[in-house]
Image (cartoon, rainbow, N blue to C red):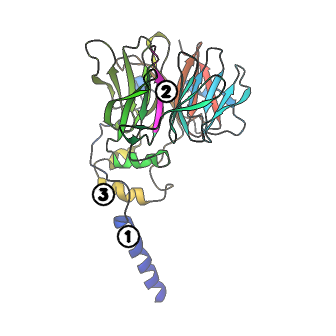
Amino acid sequence: MKTGKYILVFFLILFLYLIAWPVPIDPVAWTPLSAPNLEGKYAVNDYLASSDIIHTNGSIGPEDVDVDEKGILYGGFLDGKIIRFDSNGNSLGVFADTKGRPLGLDFDNSGNLIIADALKGLLSVDQSGNLSTLATQIDGIPLSFTDDVDVGPDDMIYFTDASEKFNVHNYRGDLWEHQPHGKLIRYNPSTEKLTLLLDNLYFANGVAVSDNGEFLLFNETYDYSISKYWLLGPKSGTREKIFTNTPGFPDGISSGSNGVFWVAMFTPRNAAADALAPKPFLRKIVYRLPLFVQPAPVRYGFVLGIDSNGKVIYNLQDPSPNSFSPITSVEENNGVLYFGSLNYPGIASIKRPQ
C-alpha cells in the first residue's frame, strides 16, 4: 500500500516538474514550411564518404578551419586552442590559445587571423601568435555568442552574434524558444568602430563576403534560411532572403571559386522539432526533459554549394552513421574542400567537385 502511494507521489512530482518547473526559454508558436525531401536536387548520395581525415591527436571540435597563403591549415578547437597543420596533415602545434571557444576563423589582408570566439568576443592573432581583443560588446551590450567571421576585400570584418540571450553552452535554448536574438555586425579595424547591420535574427550563424565585396551571405540556423545583405550599390544596407526552407540546419558558409558559396548543414531537418514548432507549451516540456530524450541531430554529412541567388549547384552528402559529422564549416583552397565539425576529433578534406 505504501509502495503505491510512493509511486503516485513520484508521478505527481514528475508531472508538476514537466508542466511547471521554471525554464529560461519563452517559446513562441511558429509554423515552418514542410521540410524538403532528400530527393531531386537534394538526392541522397555518398560523395563525402571518401573524405580524408586529418587526425588531430585528441583535440576535439574544429568548428571552423581556414588556410593561410602558405597553405597551412588552421582549426579552432573545443579547448580554445588554434592548431596548425601542414599540407600533409601533420600537426605544427598550437598557434594560439583563446582560453574560450573559437567558432569562426578568417585571415585579414595583413595575415592576421581574425577569430569569432563564443566566450571571448572578436579576437585577432598576428603572425607571431600574439593574441589581442578587438571587441567584447556593442552599444553597451556584451557579445554573448560570437559565432562566425569573414573579412571583406577592404579589410572590413563582418561577424555574427548568434544570440544575445543564450550562450554556447545552451545553444539549444535558442532553438526551443525561437525568438530572434541574433545580430550581424561590422568591425572597422581602422577606426575600431562597431556597426550593427542587422538584429532580430534567428540564431545568426555563418557569414561570407563575396569576392568583390558587393554583398555578403549569412545563415539563420533556426529559421532554415540564407539571406543576402548588400554592402555596395543602390541596394546597400538592405537584406533579401535568397534561400528559404533549407533541407537542414544551415551552419557555416564560405565563398569558394567560380561564384560558389559552400553551406555546411549541421544535420538534416528534424521532423519532431518541426512538429513541435507551433506548440510552445510542449516545447517547454521537452526542454525540461533530459537531453537524451529530446529530439537530437543525426550523424549525417551534408554540404550544399549554392550561387549568390540561392540556386543549388552542388549537393554533397554522406548518410552513413560513421560519417564525418556534424559538418559546421567548409573552406575551399586550391581545389580542395576542408571541413570543420562541432565535436569530431579531426578535420576532413576532399577534392572539390567539378
**Which badge, 2 or 1, comes first in the chain's sequence?**
1
**Is mark 3 in CB contact (under 8 Å) with mark 2?**
no
- Residue 328 part of the magenta segment: no
Query: What is the secondary structure assignment of the residue under circle 3?
Result: helix
Q: Position of residue 217 (x, y in %)?
A: 39, 23
The quadrant in which residue 126 appears is top right
Residue 303 got which mark?
2
Let me know if residue 328 appears in the view.
yes
Q: Position of residue 184 (x, y in %)?
A: 37, 31
Residues rendered magenta in the picture: 146-155
* Mark 3, residue position: 281
| Residue visible at 44% across and 59% down in the picture | 289
Left or right, 223 with reference to 252? left
The quadrant holding residue 202 is: top left
SS at mark 1? helix
| Label 2 with label 1: CB-CB less than 8 Å | no
Tell me the crowding category of disc 1: few under 14, some 14 to 19, or many 20 or more residues within 10 angstroms, Cα based.
Answer: few
Disc 3 from disc 2: Cα separation: 33 Å
Which residue carries the number 1 mark? 15
Which residue is farthest bottom?
1
Q: Badge 3 local density, few (<14 within 10 Å), some, or many (20+)?
A: some
Work out whether mark 3 precedes mark 2 in sequence or the reverse, and give the earlier one: 3
Q: CA distance from mark 2 to mark 1?
A: 41 Å
Query: At 37% across and 49% down in the image, what residue appears?
Result: 176
How many labels, in total? 3
Q: Is residue 279 above or below residue 64?
A: below
Q: Residues within 10 Å of mark 2 (few under 14, many from 20)?
A: many
Q: Amino acid at mark 2?
A: Val
Residue 83: give its label: none
- Residue 2 location in percent, x, y? 47, 88
